[in-house]
Amino acid sequence: MAYSTSSLSLLHSYQIIHSLHCHRTLKKIKPSFIFSRVEKHSSLICFSSKKKLSFMDQILDYIEGGPKLRKWYGAPDILAKDGNPLEEDESREGDEVRDAVLVTDGDNEIGQMIILSLIVKRVRVKALVKDKRAAMEAFGTYVESIAGDAKNNTFLKKALRGVRAVICPNEGFLSNVDSWKGLQHVILLSQLSVYRDTSGIQAMMNSNARKLSEQDESMVKASGIPYTIIRTGVLKNNRGGKQGFSFEEGSATQGSLSKEDAAFICVEALDAVPQKGLVFEVVNGDDKVSDWKSFFQTLLDNSSQQ
């Protein structure tokens, strides 16, 4: 595998599996992967919809060894019944610790992969979703699901409360830069290189996505918040962790990248906070990354010299 033991402290003993679509709560939110501990061989998991535990509780029971260990993973002991346990007291806004990561599209396939990776890393996760109740049924209290208009300044200000970093897995979810005050890092997954390289009918089909991607990149660069823009090639449904990578300039217009690898790289980039900004291209290739922390540090060093 391309992921090394020095990458994520927990991921080195996990592998991606694709059997989550069987659960009835995933009619709208359908995470396509989760990490299953592997010792000598891989295993597939398919939970019955008749179980009383929520979907994410079942998954995390398996990963963590049982509900008694959930507290160690940072999950609450008691699940809320009304689907609204995560409303925040506005009086705490000024003194609240910023320790959460906001995923701007929790309905997006890559966004769900990012969310599940962050849960495994024991990161406090917030996510913008269309259906809060469906998200609660899918992810339980491991994710603070927020539904609303991301272009509304009041709503966005509330969504960003307690957030240290934002990961944007899809274009068109960034707005109201004035509400970003206090953010430490914005990570944007961008296919702008792909959109710019298309022509003819394909270019017409991608015109709106290209416009949104250009707006997102411009907004991030002008925000004054440290940012990382990850420009990928065409995103595909291939299994992640099976190939290496290429980070050559111009590679995004020629190659493709597994969605799982894209999600993995977004999470790895979280703690590599640039002083101003970092932009790089990535596709699947032949280069193996044995130490992602060192890799990002090299990128940051090279960027600061330019």
Image (tube, rainbow, N blue to C red):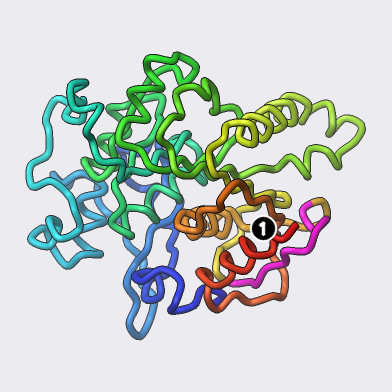
Look at the picture and state if 300 lies above or below 89: below
Expressed as whole percent of the image width and height from the top left, the position of residue 156 reads 41, 22
Look at the picture and state if 102 lies above or below 22: above
- Give the residue at x 86% y 42%: 197
Closer-to-camera residue (248/115): 248
- Give the residue at x 21% y 26%: 88
Look at the picture and state if 11 lies above or below 221: below
Q: Which residues are magenta?
A: 242-252
Quarter of the image containing the N terminus?
bottom right
Q: How many marks?
A: 1
Residue 212 visible in the picture = yes
For the residue marked with disc 1, what is the amino acid? Ser
Picture quadrant where residue 2 is located = bottom right
Picture quadrant where residue 240 is located = bottom right
- Give the residue at x 59% y 72%: 242
Look at the picture and state if 138 lies above or below 9: above
Expressed as whole percent of the image width and height from the top left, the position of residue 303 reads 68, 58
Expressed as whole percent of the image width and height from the top left, the position of residue 74 reads 18, 53
